[in-house]
Every structure is written in C-alpha cells, then in structure tokens.
Image (cartoon, grey):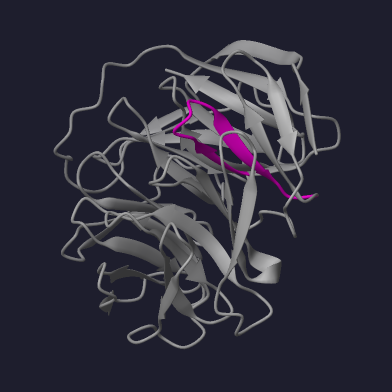
Amino acid sequence: MQTTRRPRTALASTVGLLVAMAGCGGAGTVAPAPAAAVIIREVATLDGAAPGSIVSGRDGSIWIGILNGRSLLRYKLDGSLTMFRAGLTSAPNGGVTAGPDGNVWFAELDVNLIGRITPAGTVAEFATSGKASLGPSAITSGPDGNLWFTDYGANAIGRMTPQGTVTEFTSGISAEAALTSIAPGADGNLWFTENAGNRVGRITPSGVVTEFAQLPVPRALPGQIAAGPDGNLWFTEGGANRIGRITPAGRLTEFGDGLSRDAFPSAITAGRDGNLWFTEIGANRIGRITPGGTVTEFVGGISPNAGLRAITLGPDGAIWFTEQDAGRIGRVTY
C-alpha cells in the first residue's frame, strides 16, 4: 500500500547565531566555506507519522523510516510525499542507507531483518543472524559494494551482499558492547561506536576488528558516527555532552565548548560547507562544528520539543533532519 500527497509547509525563519565558541584542538585540513545565513524550514509529514532515520537516496529523493508504523516515507524535492507499507514486517527502526545498487536499504531491529526498497517501492527482506531478539541497529553502504550493519543482539558487525548473503564478525569486539552506529571512513574501512563499551572501533572489509581505548568520560554514550571532510571520523557523545573526533590512526579529540548544557548530541553528518552538522535532542537545536572544533547552535525555525533525531546531507546540498515528536522533517540551508 502506498499513499501520496503534497505536504503543507511549516514556518521558515532566518536563524541567528546562538553560540559560537572555539573548542580545544588543532585546525582541520579542510577550510570551511565563509559564513552565510542559515535558514531552517520545517515540512509536515503525513498525519500521525513519527519520522526516525533519514537518508538521501540515489534517486534524488529523501527517504525516512517511520518509527510508529511499518512504513517508509519518500519525500521528493518537488514537495510530494509517498508512504510505502507493503512488504515491511516491522518498523525500520534500525536506520536507512542508500545502497550501492541504487536502492534504499533499511534495518528492522525488532525482527532481525534487513530490508531493501526500490525507487518504485518494491520491498524485499533478508534475515540476519537471528541469534537474539534484537538485531540490526544501524546500517550503511561499505566501500566494497556491500551493506554493513551493527547487530546489537548478536554483538557483531554484519556484512550483507546486495543479493542478501550475510556474514557476521564477532572476533575482536568486547562483550556486551551495544554496537550503535557504523559508517565508512576515508581509509577504506568501516568505523563503529559501542554505546556500552564506551569506545570507537574499526573493521576492515575482510572483517579484522580494532577497538580503540575507552572514551575519557565514563558512560559517554557514543552515538552516531560519520566521516568528516577532514579525513577523520566524527561522532556524538550524548552522555558526555561532547562531539568526538578520531583519526584513522586512532587519535582522539573531544569538543564540548559551545554546546548547550544537556544538549545531548545524537546524530551527525558532513555538510557541503566543510563542516559537520548534528542534532541535539536535549537542547532541541541543530549544531554545527568546524573541523577545528568551533561549535555554533541554531534554534530558530524548530518547533518546541520537536524530538530531533536523525540528520543527513540532502540531494540539494541542504541538511535534512527528522523531528520524531513534531511529526516533521526539517531543512537547513547555509
């Protein structure tokens, strides 16, 4: 079943600078673009939907996993929305990613399934390990042409071919790590976070795992990880209220200056301006951090208590994010 309509547009406002403070750490290798006006605009989704994960598809659309139903939402830049429900066993609550085959892939955490949806809306599902009640918690495309995912319940990193063949790797991963996020790095490897293990790890396409030292703050709760424009990996630390940067060699730098108290940064992505952008669940703001660690927060144009969740670079060069509680998606131009 699919439903299509054009959404109403919520408010659009020019956002002023709230906080801009230098962090600790050296300059990055990529110079950010000159400062420009930042505008945040919200777009209502279908009534009652709770948008979760978000990704820019290779079809030029934005795809959103809906948390309170077995459905995926496609948003086209012309403003049209289409909801796809047929073929999904559960909610795509383990994330979405643009696949190497031109399709969108998604993870169904509760039922140990990885799903694939074509631009036309045809869904296929593939089983993972099935070793635990909770399965894939995050998914991404790898440099080897396969899909990679974190298997929360099996405490493993999984690799799936576009044909659905699964291989899981457990060697080198600490027990009860609570694998949370995974992303490809500029070094040709995959990088992941361990929410309970309180560390960042790396896995090669052949499955060799390296874990790096635990983060300085206990229970820092490392969340989403993303490749930065400077060749490093950047990740959120909700519990420590910081943004972390780790080099391919494993050198760690953390940035906390400029973040609101109890901001609880959650999701992060690289923008076309040479910076990284992130959501703040606690402060209800969108943050921006330069490769050198300078943080700026933005709040104008965001509904109160929106429940900011995921964030991605859109096909139009804007930053797009989801508002789980407000039932909207947001667009940041800069």
Residue at 56% in and 17% down: 77
Quadrant where the C terminus sits is top left
Using the rendered view, name the quadrant where residue 159 is placed.
Answer: bottom left
| Of the pair 282 and 59, the residue shown nearer to us | 59
The picture places residue 20, in percent across and down from the top left corner, at 39, 30
The picture places residue 208, in percent across and down from the top left corner, at 25, 78
Magenta span: 53-68
Task: Indicate left or right for 144 with 219 as reference.
Answer: left
Q: Is residue 224 visible?
A: no
Residue at 25% in and 38% down: 229
Task: Indicate left or right for 323 with 131 as reference.
Answer: right
Quadrant where the N terminus sits is top right
| Of the pair 186 and 169, the residue shown nearer to us | 169
Residue at 55% in and 79% down: 129
Residue 62 magenta: yes
The picture places residue 223, in percent across and down from the top left corner, at 49, 59
| Of the pair 265 and 101, the residue shown nearer to us | 101
| Of the pair 154 and 17, the residue shown nearer to us | 154
Residue 15 magenta: no
Residue at 60% in and 13% down: 78
Q: Is residue 162 visible?
A: yes
The picture places residue 215, in percent across and down from the top left corner, at 37, 70
Using the rendered view, name the quadrant where residue 162 is placed.
Answer: bottom left
Using the rendered view, name the quadrant where residue 158 is placed.
Answer: bottom left
Q: Is residue 225 above or below residue 218?
A: above
Q: How many marks?
A: 0
